[in-house]
Amino acid sequence: MELVAFLGSDRENWGQITALLKRMKWDKVVLIKNKSASEFPNIGSVIEINSEKPLLDLIVELKEKLKKELTGDFEVTLSIASGNGKEHMALVSSLLAIPVGIRLVAFTKDGVKFL
């Protein structure tokens, strides 16, 4: 199972990603990091983006970079606990355009839950 997770500038939500990384065994981890998320440790493959780009440019960039990182499975597990709406739209749009299915995941008080 591959995990694709977005890391935005909202550091209070980084714990969500950290918990997912520690509590599940992933075949591959791809972190998409906003340029302001540079302090988060690089775990797995890292794609750095500039979220200030226009949405359509961001989608094209993410699609090209994600195609190279994903193994070709039909589905990825996705965490969008961190980031903003524009970043989430770009990530979801690029994954669906590759095309891969997405399965949302979150860490809750009851552990890892697939949504």
Image: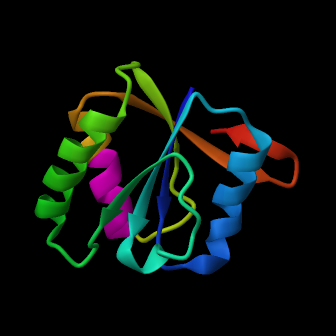
Dominant SS of magenta comes to: helix
Q: Position of residue 26 (x, y in %)?
A: 63, 32
What residue is rendered at 66% in x and 78% in y?
12
- Residue 89 found in image quarter: bottom left
Which of the image's four quarters has the C terminus? top right
Q: Total of numbered circles in the picture?
A: 0
Range of magenta residues: 85-93
Residue 58 shown left or right of residue 32 in the figure: left
Q: In the image, is residue 83 part of the stretch drawn in magenta? A: no
Q: Nearer the viewer, residue 38 or 12?
A: 38
- Residue 10 found in image quarter: bottom right
What residue is rendered at 69% in x and 58% in y?
18
Q: Position of residue 20 (x, y in %)?
A: 70, 48
Q: Position of residue 1 (x, y in %)?
A: 57, 26
What residue is rendered at 42% in x and 71% in y?
84
| 82 is higher (above) or lower (below) than 62 | below
Residue 48 shown left or right of residue 94 in the figure: right
